[in-house]
Amino acid sequence: MKNGKILISGAGIAGPTLAYWLRRYGFEPVLIERAPALRAGGYLVDFWGLGFDVAERMALAPALYREGYHITEVRIVDDEGRRAGGFKADSIRTVLGDRFTSILRSDLSQLIYEELKGQVPTIFGDTITAVEQREDGVHVRFKHREPERFDLLAGADGLHSAVRNLVFGPEDTFEKYLGYYVASFSALGYPHQERDAFISYAAPGRQVSRYTLRDGRTVFFFIIASDNKLAVGTHDVQAQKQVLRDAFGRDGWECAQILSALDAADDLYFDAVSQIEMPSWVQGRVALVGDAAFCPSLLAGQGSSLAMGAAYILAGELAKANGDYAVAFKRYEDMLRPVMAGKQRAARSFAGSFAPKTRLGIFLRNQITAFMSRPFVAKFFMGKLLTDPIALPDYSGASGPPLSGRPGSQAAPRTP
């Protein structure tokens, strides 16, 4: 196998998926992750489509259903907590043939990583600082480790990809801001708990939702419309919390209690809603995968699934081409670029329904959702997001032996 030693930046969703399939095909992947351990907590993602297909081929479906959540109702409420819209989630499952679950993004990442069985070296708590491509491979410098040569480099490090920044150019060259910010945190012992119901409240230009987890924690999810990007630092948690207080501080429903819970939160996620649009996802021996390459935006609801699908295809094409990266990278991009462009268009058109900017817009959105308990209505309004215009290729002819566990091997620790 040519070009067998492959460094993968990012141990979220795309990175471990890519590592799993590369290892299975006989390559030697190495993961590097900026965080000191796999991340815990985070927000709830809906999981279906290409990623579900990949998960089934990894025999992960039973674990997904076990760790996931079976949301039965999406309920929209008014200032007094009275039902104003929403639908039964079975309509979505009917459209998808019941191949659907909701799961914490960190739990999905952990499940994928555990499938590596301790056989893929992982460097935690370090990051790539320089990349130089030469005839003999990719020479990589790190913040803490000694420099090392690899045959190929894959950037699976998300919307704010370090690999993309180093090899392709600064983030603002490729970022398309969609006019929204999202935030999420969890709280233990929140007084209002309703199992299996995803409950949302909206005011013009903003929305907050909550969902109760099995362990008594409640996850909250915020959306705020903003015409311009905010002058808030990426790591300035207090400033981020203040943005949420300013946005929801005068709102009804449970907003006062939610903001009170926010004060003690130590797991706040806060970011702009953006897409990544690039003329090419590959350069020489370097390829981007997942949000680093084609982020459809968090509001698309399918980022994790698309990342898994893309990682599977990239690994499969490298195996099919026997490590000839020029051939494999071209096939990978030719196959997926039209799909991801379509997903990005669908996400842009759908984004406004999450946080309508007027009371009339909220009213109309709520009325539409009241009819979405009927599968044909759900398919009409959400079909482009729910369906994938591509079948997952079969690379079984290129597959090596399945991974086997090493006695005493352990999954990576997770940050709280």
Image: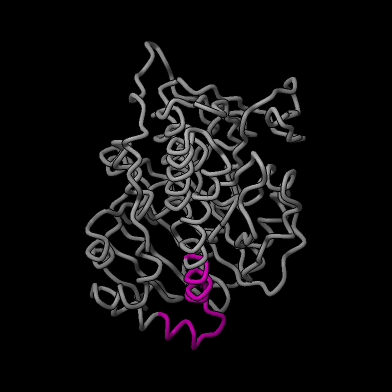
Q: Nearer the viewer, residue 312 or 35?
A: 312
- Depicted 114 relative to depicted 186: above or below: above
15 relative to 94 in the view: left or right: right
140 relative to 273 in the view: left or right: right
Indicate yes or no whether the magenta region holds residue 357: yes
- Depicted 120 relative to depicted 313: above or below: above
Task: Specify the segment rendered in magenta.
Answer: 343-365
- Residue 142 rendering spot, x and y as whole percentages: 74, 28
Give me the residue at 63% from left, 55% from top. 280
- Residue 7 rendering spot, x and y as whole percentages: 60, 31
- Depicted 250 relative to depicted 387: above or below: below
Any part of residue 257 in sight: no
The quadrant of the rendering that contains the C terminus is: top right
Give me the residue at 43% from left, 42% from top. 312
Give me the residue at 46% from left, 62% from top. 339
Location of residue 11 (image quadrant): top right
- Depicted 88 relative to depicted 328: above or below: below
Q: Nearer the viewer, residue 201 or 168?
A: 168
Give me the residue at 30% from left, 73% from top. 379
- Residue 296 rendering spot, x and y as whole percentages: 53, 61
